[in-house]
Image (cartoon, rainbow, N blue to C red):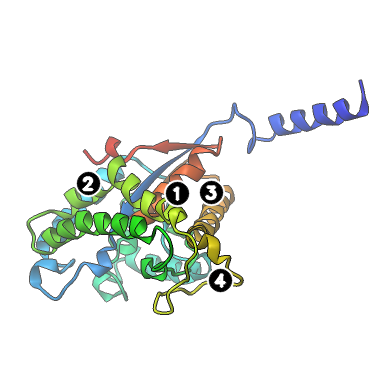
Amino acid sequence: MSKKRYILSVALIILTLNPIFSQNSPKTEILLVGFDHLGQMDNGTPSSDIFSPKKQKEIIKLTEKLRTFSPDQIMVEKEPSEQKQVDSLYKAYRENTLKLSEIEYGSSETYQIGFRLAKMLNLETVYGIDHYESTSQSLLSSGKNIDIFKNGLLELMNTARPMKKKVQQDSLSIYDYIKTINQPKFIDLSHNLIFNLPAYVINGKFSENGTNTVDIGKIDEKYIGAEYITLFYNRNLKIYSNILNAQLDHNSKRIFLIMGQLHIGVLKDLLEANPNYKIITTSEYLN
C-alpha cells in the first residue's frame, strides 16, 4: 500500500470511530421555530399587550404544544457572552422570585416561550447562540434590477403585516400566527428575499440611511446585491457555529431553537447539510 493510500485509510478510520463524524452515530434532532418578535408586538393598545390574559393563554397553548417535542436543550436569541445574565434571570424565574413582566423585554419569545418551556421541562437553563449584527433591508436601495428586490420586499410586507395587525387586534391568535409563518411557503418567501433576490442587483451603492452595524470594509459595487447577501450570511454562519458548539458542549440530543423567522431558512439549509443533525418539521408539533 502506498503511503498516500495508507494515510487516507487511517483518516477514514479516525473519522468513522469519532462519534462526531460517524454516519452511524445518532443524529441530534433540532426543531427550528421562527418568530415575528413578540417583544415588538405591543403597539400601545390593550389587545396587543403580550401580558393580557388572552395573549398569555395563546402563548401557553403554543408552549404546551412545543413541550411535546421534549427538548433537552433550548437555544434562544441571546449571545453566548450574555449567558451569565440569562442564567441568573432564569434561576430567579424558575424559583418563582421573578415574573416575566419584571424582566426588561420580558414580552419577547426568549422569555415567554424559552424560559416558560425550560421551566416546564425542568431544564437547567436556556442557551444563547445569537451573534448580534444588524443590517436593514433599506441598506440595499439602488442599482440595476433593484426593482426585483423591492418587489420581493413589498410581497413579504404585504403578506406579514396584515397578519401581525390581526394579532394586535386579537382577531388572530399568537399560536395561529406562529404556526402560519413557519409553514414552508412563508419560510421560503423570507429566505428568497434575503438570500436570492439581492443577487440580481448590480452596479449600485449602499444607502447612507440604511442600518448596518457590520464593518463592511471594501465593497465591490458591481456586485452590490451579492455583498448585501454576504452581510446576512456571515451573521448566520456565526449563529450556526454557536449552535454546533453549544450542542457539543452539552451533548444534547433534542434541541429546540427560537429565532427570528428570517433566520430559519438559512439555518435550516446549513443544518440539513450537516450529517450529525436531523431537522424536525414544525408541522409535527404545531398543527
Residue 216: numbered disc = 4
State the CA–CA distance, disc 1 to disc 4: 21 Å
Q: Distance between the residues labelled 3 and 4?
A: 30 Å
Q: Earlier in the sequence, mark 3 or mark 4?
A: 4
Q: Mark 3 points at which residue?
A: 247
What residue sits right under mark 1 in the picture?
266
Q: Which of marks 4 and 2 is nearer the N terminus?
A: 2
| Residue 169, x across and y down, in percent | 8, 63
Disc on the earlier residue, 3 or 1: 3
User: What kind of residue is marked 3?
Assistant: Gln
Quarter holding residue 174 = bottom left
* 264 up-or-down from 10: above or below: below
Query: In the image, which disc is placed on residue 180?
Result: 2
Query: Which residue is pictured at 40% across the width and 75% down the height?
Result: 210
Q: Give me the residue at 37% from left, 66% from top.
A: 137
What is the secondary structure assignment of the residue under circle 3? helix
Q: Residue at x 32, y 63 (%)?
A: 111
Q: What residue type is labelled 4?
A: Ile
Of tags 3 and 4, the one toward the viewer is 4
Are dots 1 and 4 in contact, CB under 8 Å? no
